[in-house]
Amino acid sequence: MTEGPAFCGGRMVEERWKTVAIVDDDTAVLESFQFMLEMAGFPVAAYRSAKAFLRDAGMSPRCLIVDLNMPCMTGLELAARLRAEGNAVPVLLVSSSPSPASIARALEIGLSGIMEKPLREDEVTAFIRSCGPGPDRSAISPPGTGRR
């Protein structure tokens, strides 16, 4: 795991707008999440901190999935900063125990969603697909299996 974005098939430049960015300070969670999404067909850029994500100035992801509780800058602080800068990227906030205050703040900032850990793959991929066109999984997932 690097501090910067992950590459997908050597096509980082042309695929950046399709990339799902994940920010989580827990390396095991980050790697597991990255693996799950890559297996679902999504290019992923993984970051261990909000500051690492912000340093990647060229990153304009399809969506951002961010952990609520991180040191230095929380997921809510990162989302608020992006919104203050005029960045409307869809943001999914994830937490093992979202408080009513954090939920209210997420709604105030205009986040796209909040999910409680452990995350379900079908719910996460549905969120990502709602953020615009992405990988066509129809050739892999037969109709009627519940997977898109």
Image (cartoon, grey):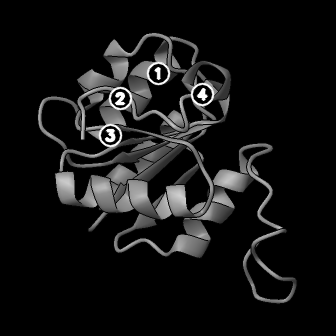
Q: Is residue 39 above or below residue 19?
A: below
Per the image, the residue denoted by label 1 is 82
Mark 1 and mark 3: span between their CA atoms? 11 Å
Disc nearest the viewer among 4 and 3: 4
Could you tell me residue 131's position as x and y percent? 71, 45
Mark 4 and mark 2: span between their CA atoms? 27 Å
Q: Quadrant of residue 25?
A: top left
Side of 142 relative to 83 (left or right): right
Residue 75: assigned label? 3
Q: Is residue 21 above or below residue 84?
A: below
Q: Tell me what residue is drawn at x 13 percent, y 29 percent.
A: 72
Q: Are marks 2 and 1 in contact (CB under 8 Å)?
A: yes
Q: Which of the two labelled residues, at mark 4 and mark 3, occupies the earlier sequence position?
A: 4
Q: Are marks 2 and 3 in contact (CB under 8 Å)?
A: yes
Q: Are marks 1 and 4 in contact (CB under 8 Å)?
A: no
Could you tell me residue 41's position as x and y percent? 63, 56
Query: Mark 4: which amino acid?
Result: Arg
Residue closest to the far bottom:
144
- Secondary element at tag 2: helix
Q: Are marks 1 and 3 in contact (CB under 8 Å)?
A: no
- Secondary element at tag 3: helix
Query: Mark 3: which amino acid?
Result: Gly
Mark 1 and mark 4: span between their CA atoms? 26 Å
Q: Which of the two labelled residues, at mark 4 and mark 2, occupies the earlier sequence position?
A: 4
